[in-house]
Image (cartoon, rainbow, N blue to C red):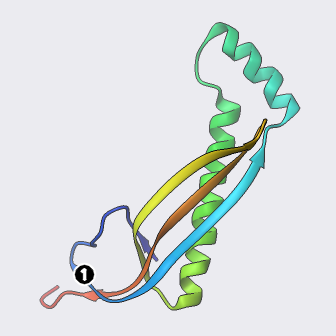
Amino acid sequence: MIITTSEAIAGHRIVKTLGIVRGNTVRARHVGRDILAGLRNIVGGEIHEYTKLMAESREQTIDRMVADAAKLGANAIVATRFTTSVIVGGAAELLSVGTAVVIEPEQGD
């Protein structure tokens, strides 16, 4: 499935718009990671434990969004956006949302 943040896909035309699709996950911090993050916060630099946690969470939201689109019969998702919001102290929701569409190659491609 093609996923893009743009409204169109080069070399293809949208032949049917199926609707909004989404994927979300809520993740909590891990005490062990918090200790390492606290130490890195003192000396500065990237907090790799949280970078990995957020990357895994984004991938999970994309997978869930693709599954939602597949149920509708889509072969692409356009206008994809990502948001993060704090639910409670130490937990955040990651959400991916886009528009499920059916595309086909443009003539001559």
Is 108 placed above or below 7 here?
below
Residue at 51 percent across and 91 percent down: it is 73
The location of residue 102, given as percent across then percent down, is 38, 88
Residue at 79 percent across and 38 percent down: it is 29
Is 50 placed above or below 9 here?
above
> Quarter-wise, where is residue 48 in the image?
top right
Q: Nearer the viewer, residue 49 or 23?
A: 23
Give the number of marks: 1
**Residue at the right extreme, as displayed:** 31
**Residue at the left extreme, as displayed:** 108
Q: Amino acid at mark 1?
A: His
Q: Secondary structure at mark 1?
A: strand
The location of residue 77, given as percent across then percent down, is 43, 74
In the displayed structure image, the side of residue 87 where residue 77 appears, left or right: left
The location of residue 45, given as percent across then percent down, is 58, 17
In the displayed structure image, the side of residue 3 where residue 92 appears, left or right: right
> Quarter-wise, where is residue 65 in the image?
bottom right
In the displayed structure image, the side of residue 109 where residue 39 appears, left or right: right
Is 85 placed above or below 3 here?
above
Disc 1: which residue: 12
Q: Residues within 10 Å of mark 1 (few under 14, many from 20)?
A: some
Q: Nearer the viewer, residue 7 or 40?
A: 7
Residue at 54 percent across and 89 percent down: it is 72
The location of residue 105, given as percent across then percent down, is 25, 87
